[in-house]
Structures are given as structure tokens and as C-alpha cells.
Amino acid sequence: MNNRNLLLFAILAALYVATGVFQSWNLALNILNLGLLSAIMALGVNMQWGYAGLFNTGIMGFAALGGLAVVLTSAPPQPEGWAAGGWGILAGLLFGVAVIVAGTQLYQRMAKGRARNLALLVLLVGGFFAFRAIFDPAVEAVEAINPASAGNIGGLGLPSLLAWPLGGVLAAAAAWAIGKISLGLRSDYLAIATLGIAEIIIIVLKNEDWLARGVKNMIGLPRPWPVPYEVDLQQSSTFLDWAAQYGFDPIVASSIVVKLLYALIFGLVLVVVVWMSELALKSPWGRMMRAIRDNEVAAEAMGKDVTRRHLQIFVIGSAVVGFAGAMMTSMDGQLTPGTYNPLRFTFLIWVMVIVGGSGNNWGAVLGGLLIGWLWLIVESLGPGVMAVITSGMAEGALKAHLVDSAQHMRLLTLGVILLLVLRFSPRGLIPEK
């Protein structure tokens, strides 16, 4: 890493330190944790776009699948839900998979023609109605069990840390299915397809209450080890003695300790992902992926299976995003499908990759931390800055409106930053070598 890059990271560190000194360390650490998670997601997208040139706009869906993994793994089980219809739901899902597999085998084994089309139509239509006959009554029975606080099948009650790799696995499985269908499309059609499928994933999470309570949200998810709850720290005599010794407010200190532990865990994960990404990028595999990105025809002429390699990198990058999505849900302690929107989980991650420098892992990290800081700091700094700007204006509705709506200027700020970077450093702040 050269001196210019070190200077950029030093400036970034100074921004976070200044936030802690002039505003609050709680705010600075909260922004840092979200920035670390965003940087991990940006690394996943950078693998797809920077290594292979795949334009994936379904980041939101893969992050949501990571969040779902936390519910399925660490949420407390609901025995009443399973007794009422949980096994029926499982049987219906297995039957649906069996119908899809049977349809695939039928399509591959029968000769092309009207008979194959008719047989496939009968199998799929009949299988759909049979699936609904098994699935729907079981869902209704589960969702009728104490819908105010449950109405779902719950999870396995396992430690939250186990949900993180499962989040990567769920996202990778979805990416494999999407890639098998969509990776043969042109880049713009791939973007449309992935965005549409991500929206479908969110719609399923919002409407299937039996899975994760839908829009009623899943709350009270356990924290990962070794992060404690603030109230437990505040009731610990050892912690209270330590806080009194150094003159800290126990409530503020407990919140800072928790956020510091999250920052340590997320930072370790980020270091591992960067290390593995750098090894992959500098390996023969990484050089092959960049060759495919730069000229697919030439790479295919040299005997490389372009479609297979695209699928491979699409699955790996999506798994990284799903892993980070599970980490975010563990930190929040809840799954709220309504918060997953393309602006936060797709557009913002793409801005991080572009500003940082696509094709460069350190650029993705810089972009994730910088844009993550900017995205959240505008909300707290905006009203103060606007109050200074409008200080010469007469008191009235216009001035009040400008000050009150200043926190929504983050989109304008991001747009200006993006335009400046594209104008003066079109390959990003840390461009690919």
C-alpha cells in the first residue's frame, strides 16, 4: 500500500475520531460498525464486478437471506407451531422441490416435441395444486398460533455465531439458482433480473408469517458470543467498580463496551475477508477472472469456461454479502423485512465500490467505511450545517423547513461525492493496479 493510500485511510480514521470527540463515541462506534459491515458487502460486490464484470443489483436480497439465517438458526423454537403445521409446511416444501426436480428430469429425458410440452404442463400444473393442498392448510394452522407474539415455526435456538456461515450458504444457494438462469443474459438484463429476484425475496419475507413473522418483525434475537447485553453490564459489580474508578457513566460506558466488542469482531471478519480476497486476486485464478472480464471471447478461445467461472464468482460474492447480512441482523437483534430497500442495500453498496475503486479490495474497504460514515453523519450534522447556512434568513416557514429537512440531504451529498470522484478520479480513490 503506497503513501497516498495510507494518507486516505489516515484521513478516514481522523473522520471517525473527530466524530467521537466532537459528537459522541457511541455515535462514532455505531457508524464504524455499520461501515465495517458495509465494507464486507462491498468486498462481495467487488468480487463480482471488479473481478468478473458481473452487474448484480440484487444485493438487498442476499443480505436479507443472511438475516433470515439468523432467525432460522438462533431464534427460540416454537413447539406449538411445529405441532400445529410445521411438519406439513416442511412436507409441502419438499414436495415442491420434488416436482421441480421431476420436471427438470422430464424435460431432459423426453424428446423435444408436443408430447414433452404436454407432459411437462400436466406435471407442473398438477404439482402446483397438490403443493398448495399440502402447504396452505399447514401455513394457516401455524400462523393461527398466538399471532401477536409468535405465529411462526421459530428457529433452532443455536448460538448466533453459527448463523453467519449459514447466511453465506443461503445466499450462495440462491445465487447458484439465480446464476443458472440469469448469467447467460447480457449485463443490463442480468441487472434487471437480479433486482427483480431480490424484490421477490423481500416480498416472501414480508408475506410468509410462518417463516419469520413477516412485517410483524422478528425481535429478541440473541447476540453473538462474547457480546453481552448493556443491562447485564450495568448490573455487574465488577463493571460498576471499573466505571466508577475511571469516572465513567455506567450506562454510556456499557453501550461503548458493547459497540467496541462488535467492532472487534466485525474488524476481524473484515481482515480475514480482505486477506482471502487478496490471495484470490493475486492467484492464477484471479488473473483468469480478470482476463475473462476484459475479453470474454479471447478467454473462451483459450479454453476457459466463461459461464462456469461467472457462476463461481457470482456465488462467492453473494455468499460474502449474505454473511455480512447475517452479522448485521445479529447486531440489530431483530429481522425487519421492511427495512430492506434497494437504496440502502444495493445503490449505497455500489457507490462504495465505485468511489473506493472497483477491482481493488482496499478500495472497496475504503469506500465502505467512507460512504458508510457519510451516509450516517449527514443525519446528525445536517441540521447544524443548515442552521449556519440559513442564519442570515428571516425566521419563518421556509427556514424551519430547510433546517428540519437537512437530514434528508444525504442523497444530494452522495450524488455530489460520486460526481466529484467520477470527474477527478474515474477509477476510484484507490484504482485497480
Image (cartoon, helix red, strand yellow):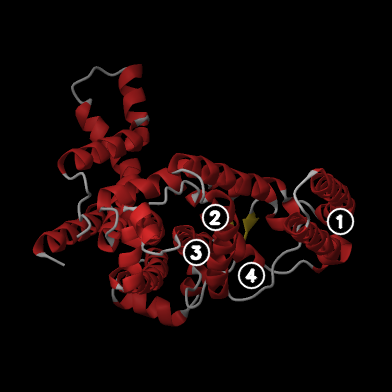
Tell me the quarter of the image containing the N terminus: bottom left
Q: Secondary structure at mark 4?
A: helix
Q: Secondary structure at mark 1?
A: helix
**Residue type, numbered disc 4:** Thr
Residue occupying the far left of the picture: 3
Q: Secondary structure at mark 3?
A: helix
**Residue type, numbered disc 2:** Gly
Question: Label 4, label 3: how many angstroms apart (C-alpha)?
Answer: 17 Å
Question: Please, is residue 279 above or below residue 104 in the view?
Answer: below
Residue 319 numbered mark, or none: 3
**Closer to the camera in the image, 8 or 157:** 8
Residue 41 numbered mark, or none: none
**Closer to the camera in the image, 71 or 386:** 71
Q: Which residue: 66% across, 66% down? A: 72
Q: Which residue: 21% across, 44% down? A: 426
Q: Which residue: 28% across, 71% down? A: 282
Q: Which residue is mark 2?
A: 179
**Front disc: 1 or 2:** 2
Question: Label 3, label 1: how many angstroms apart (C-alpha)?
Answer: 31 Å
Q: Reading the chain from its start, which is encountered first: label 4 or label 2?
A: 4
Question: Label 1, label 4: how many angstroms apart (C-alpha)?
Answer: 21 Å
> Where residue 186 appears, x then y in whole percent?
46, 43
Q: Which residue is mark 4?
A: 73
Q: Is residue 6 left or right of residue 109?
A: left
Q: Reading the chain from its start, which is encountered first: label 3 or label 1?
A: 1
Q: Reading the chain from its start, which is encountered first: label 2 or label 3?
A: 2
Residue 138 numbered mark, or none: 1
